Image (spheres, coloured by chain):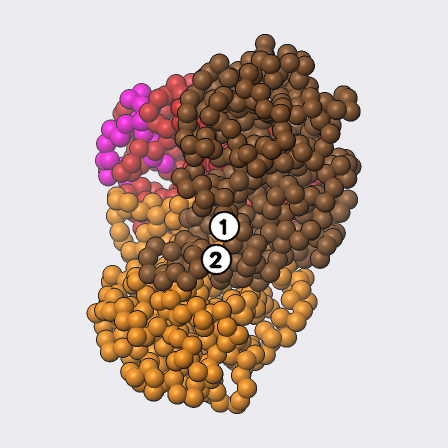
Chain colours: A red, B orange, C brown
């Protein structure tokens, strides 16, 4: 693995999950691996979990961490080929990526979807621009169409909490007041395809995800039916993919309740809107795995950085 | 001590002050104590001294430091119980506090008073929310109603500069163009109550502080009379408490001059408005202790963190 | 050397360049020098290269790094003597500089020209205010009129790439849509005066730089003539100095092309506007040294910090 851009960069999901669970028991066992190595975290968007967990993961490995909020601390970047830069952008991705490569050993990048122009979002110009022009490994801390560190943390959490070989896992849409990206759902689906499970996706009509990703997945638009005998319910809002970036409805019949959940475990990547996405009773119960998922963000990042450092 | 939320969390003020003065002579003597320990500094408001001194204190103890400006880097937090989060707030304090607890060993928080709603400010929803929901120790880097790291630094500065057993210490209001919180004055008063001194509070009528805090304190509304034979004059502006958050006057007769000060030492927590709060002649003289107070912020933070680390 | 404020603080340019080139081969050889030493980087303006390279340089020397964006994280500073601070500024440079000096061993500052008031810009109130009132060494990370870390990096890059004793070096103006400061051009000129070279400055009429700095330099307003037999072409936009801060023209006849460049190496401090300052064909060719220049920012900063640490 050179870069960690998508879930498909995971060489073996079961091995990585196993290794992460071992690492969690003694997070400092590789603290010499990152000696004299520096990671630069570049944020084009806000972050709480990703920022702190990736920083912690790097420190656990003995790395130095440099953090930049690109939006307000750096320069507006240009991505176009051949552009005459006489407008608002001050620096081309070609220079930015090469320059950052001079100052660190790994660069991690967060750059959300704009949700206006599907083609532009799917081109992933920020993360792909860095991957193309940087001379160092690039890690995706959530891009327009994927959030592979989250998906790896979710795989760890599923493994730690599974009580049977082939659990039933449901990915459910839930309502949210604002238009949200598809990144978390996309990566979760890609990750589920890498393991044995009875996997079902449920959402209102019109909220179909990218068909290239859901191809081969069971989709059930009746949420109650989808939840029957579920072991894990992974919940996430996303805006429409076909009517790109639109909020088609905020139907609170899709809000997760304790009753709907049954005996399943509740999962969400956070931040979560209480009593929109899910009612308080679920989050405040033992069935909620959200805090454990957040904790596992450290170990998903640490495994990825460990693989990168070992590869150098 | 689990948390350091108010001056009243100090177990023994004389002992802590003594220990801080010893630490100041050799700040690195406990640099193994914080090995593999991480502190997260969360800023909901601006900071210069608090930010740098707390970071330095943690580094002196060998801790790793993660810093977040919650306002523009994180998510808008919700504090209400049972709120349907369909408006501007993205994440509930319950999740935020639990999540941050997964990534570090101590969390320190700065969140100023809004000065609009007294009840809300006194509820201290940010710092108390973290203290309630976090699973790790919480340190107050200035909250709505208190600034206990500043008060502890002030106690150190008083001790280092006292020339008699029971000095006369005056807390004086002074004019300022904007409405300021009561936090520094409140914590200074609480701290003064923990030690022997001839302590007087002076302010124009209408600027009475929270009576629960000033109970038992000598209050003298004639500034000249209050300053007679003073050894230390601690100056601070605050807005009205009874007419909550209002600037009732900017009377420059209350500005501290060299003449008024006499032989007393001048103290202020900074930042200070020159020639509003105090004239240049005082700040630029040997009588000013403000830079030493700022220096002692490192050692007040370091003692607090040391106590927390030793307690784990 | 106490401070590093201008190129003229370099004690011996050839020695420092030599030492930097040696350091580049083994950047960690002095990693004990900065043990228990802290540098504070204060940004009043945006930064990418300067921020990351100075941080990396400090870490290579084993220093701890504290970073503040003064604009949005700290307080608005006052610089006037005797000002009654009843307006927008919250803290005087006198206090700010003394206070920061309590928390670290070196302070580095970036504060750009405002390009409105020449006299004010040339007074360099931020960097000079810190140098005057701080009790610790101050490093210039680009001030109103100079960028000496860049100039030192450029000297390193010139040395590494020279093929003859006395190369021909041309400093050329190029068009840009916005008004830019003179800092980089100024420091480059000062640096060139410290070494043997055939040095020529070229710019359209009206773009004469500060005559005190260009005194004794060859100025040739015909760009083609200036470029004849050049070994290095150093390109930079700047706004008018005489008609202070104005953009007099954006004449793209001054844009650097491959044809104009001939066999010369192309240099620029970055960020660079592609196809305004220089065409893609140059930047994407082997003749461009811009990425190497950016890399050398680490070693120019590291030499400066090493000199400061050794001097303590």
Residue holding disc 1: C126
Q: Is residue B122 left or right of residue A105?
A: left
In the image, which residues are magenta?
A: A236-256
Q: Is residue B72 magenta?
A: no
Q: Quadrant of residue A250?
A: top left
Q: Is residue B241 left or right of residue C28?
A: left
Q: Is residue A244 magenta?
A: yes
Above or below — where is B12 with respect to B178? Answer: below
Q: Quadrant of residue A63?
A: top right
Quadrant containing the C terminus of chain A is: top right
Q: Give A276 or A271, whichever is nearer the viewer.
A: A271
Residue A28 at what x, y percent from top left? 65, 49
Residue holding disc 2: C93
Residue furthest toward the top?
C259
Q: What's the residue at 60%, 33% (across, down)?
A: C215
| Residue contact at pointers 2 and 1, CB within 8 angstroms | yes
Chain under disc 2: C
Q: Crowding near pointer 1: few (<14 within 10 Å), some, many (20+)? A: many
Above or below — where is B58 with respect to A170? Answer: below
Q: Main secondary structure of the magenta part?
A: loop
Q: Give B303 or B154, whichever is nearer the viewer.
A: B154
């Amino acid at each position: 693995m050179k870069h960690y851009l998508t879930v498909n960069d995971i060489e073996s999901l079961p091995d990585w999950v196993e290794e992460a669970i071992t690492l969690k028991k003694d997070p400092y066992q590789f603290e010499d691996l990152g000696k004299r190595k520096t990671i630069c975290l570049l944020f084009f968007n806000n972050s709480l979990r990703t920022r702190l967990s990736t920083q912690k993961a790097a420190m656990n490995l003995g790395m130095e961490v440099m953090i930049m909020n690109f939006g307000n601390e750096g320069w507006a970047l240009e991505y176009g080929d051949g552009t005459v830069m006489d407008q608002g952008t001050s620096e081309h991705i070609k220079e930015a990526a090469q320059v950052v490569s001079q100052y660190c050993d790994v660069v991690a990048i967060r750059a959300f979807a704009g949700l206006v122009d599907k083609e532009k979002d799917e081109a992933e110009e920020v993360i792909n621009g860095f991957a193309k022009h940087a001379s160092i490994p690039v890690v995706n801390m959530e891009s327009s169409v994927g959030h592979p560190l989250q998906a790896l943390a979710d795989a760890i959490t599923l493994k730690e909490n599974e009580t049977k070989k082939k659990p039933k896992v449901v990915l459910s849409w839930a309502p949210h007041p604002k238009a949200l990206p598809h990144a978390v759902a996309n990566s979760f689906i890609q990750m589920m395809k890498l393991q044995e499970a009875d996997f079902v996706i449920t959402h209102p009509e019109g909220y179909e995800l990218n068909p290239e990703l859901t191809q081969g997945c069971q989709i059930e638009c009746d949420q109650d039916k989808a939840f029957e005998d579920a072991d894990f319910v992974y919940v996430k809002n996303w805006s429409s993919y076909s009517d790109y970036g639109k909020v088609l409805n905020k139907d609170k019949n899709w809000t997760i309740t304790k009753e709907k959940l049954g005996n399943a475990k509740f999962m969400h990547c956070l931040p979560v809107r209480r009593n929109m996405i899910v009612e308080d009773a679920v989050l405040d119960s033992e069935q909620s795995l959200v805090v454990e998922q957040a904790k596992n963000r450290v170990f998903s990042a640490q495994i990825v950085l460990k693989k990168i450092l070992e590869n150098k």
